[in-house]
Image (cartoon, grey):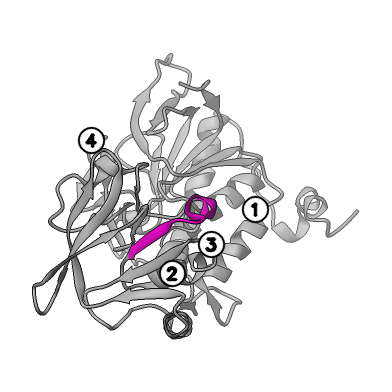
Amino acid sequence: MSKTKEVDIIIIGAGPVGLFTVFEAGLLGLKCILIDNLDKVGGQCAELYPDKPIYDIPGVPMQTAEEHVSALLEQIKPFDYSTFLNQRVESISENSSTEDEVSNWTVTTSEKNQFTAKNIFIAAGAGSFEPRRPPNIEDPDRFIGKGVSYAVRDKSLYEDKDVLIFGGGDSALDWTVDLSGVAKSVTLIHRRDEFRGAPNTESQMRKLIKQGVVNLKTPYVIESLIGDGVISGVSIKNFETKELENLSCDEIIFLFGLNKKLGPIVDWNLDLEGKKITVDTEKFETNIDGIFAVGDINNYPGKLDLILSGFHETTLAVQHAYKRCFPGERVPFGYTTSNTKLQKKLGVIE
């Protein structure tokens, strides 16, 4: 287990609201860490619909979800924060405290990292995301790292290899096109000859098929995995004729999308209403002192699942987090237009 790192706020979820929490905390001089189960920041915006237009951000007539995330990352560049991806918070524990001292929280992640802070912000959107497994296949995870993956982490892994890609969305199309120039062969397998991805990417994929660079197998579904400890192939079934066909391969990438789950949050003794966490509307704190929930994950009377609402919620929550870090001190308030320290960090003034 790595050495415990101490910060002011631990943010669970690196979507837009989690990123904006870093900004609001930075204005008050608070240090943050972001933890996310995905392999990149941005949450649903980055993973599910990067090209989706967003119209309700004040002062921005329209921007794509990906552009929105990029703008938030640019906004928090001046501040002190760290990001830990591809891991989720597995457990939280309260450290012992005295009567006149605000207690700390320690979180432990799936990668055995530990972090301590006086405040935890749950900004997990609809929950953590986990890749959908292939249907009717018993324990496909036994081949993870041995020929099966649910995301592309390093393209060099697929150099000069025979690769099978299952799926019909943006990720499947994107990686079919991208890996066609890296792998020995790429075969895309889908249950129908219709795709849910961007039309431009589908056009690129079909052009590569005509050129003989990429293989397309439709309408097929996976029947079984073949391999003794390491993947050597799959058996697929024609969705219409029910005929079976075996394909040999070195690597399989399953890109069936993501499932949204609350995960270990359900075991943290928080007041839940369905799959949402109940909070107050003064500081957006849960029933447990020092644990806040902001964004789509929370629930209160009149709640709207909008990024805009999450920005408001976390702005107020950070004010109370400051009070927990510095009991008895007044929360410093000033308009960003008159914040010379911030302007210097941003390079607006010398």
Amino acid at pointer 3: Val
- Taking the spot 32% from the left edge, 63% from the top edge, the residue there is 303
Task: Kindly report the distance in space between the C-alpha atoms of the residues bearing marks 1 and 3.
Answer: 35 Å
The x and y percentages for residue 318 are 52, 45
Q: Is residue 309 visible?
A: no
How much space separates mark 4 and mark 1, taking CA atoms?
Answer: 32 Å
Viewed as shown, does residue 201 lie left or right of 88?
right
- The answer to whether the residue labelled 3 contacts the one labelled 4, judged by CB atoms less than 8 Å apart, is no
Q: Looking at the image, tell me whether mark 4 or mark 1 is earlier in sequence order.
A: 1
Mark positioned earlier in the residue sequence (3 or 4): 3
- Residue 65 lies, with reference to residue 91, above or below; the image says below
Q: Look at the numbered discs 4 and 1 and tell me whether their residues touch, using CB distance below 8 Å.
A: no
Residue stretch rendered in magenta on the structure? 154-165
Tag in front: 3 or 4: 3
In the displayed structure, 240 sits above or below 248; it is: below
First in residue order: circle 4 vs circle 2? 2
* Front tag of 1 and 3: 3
Residue picked out by circle 3: 182
* SS for callout 2: helix
As drawn, the residue found furthest toward the right would be 350
Q: Residue at x 37, y 42 (%)?
A: 145
Amino acid on which the number 4 mark rests in the picture: Asp
Q: Which residue is mark 2?
A: 176
Density class for disc 3 (Cα within 10 Å; few <14, some 14-19, many ≥20) is: some
Q: CA distance from mark 1 to mark 2?
A: 34 Å
Compared with 160, 202 (above or below) is: below
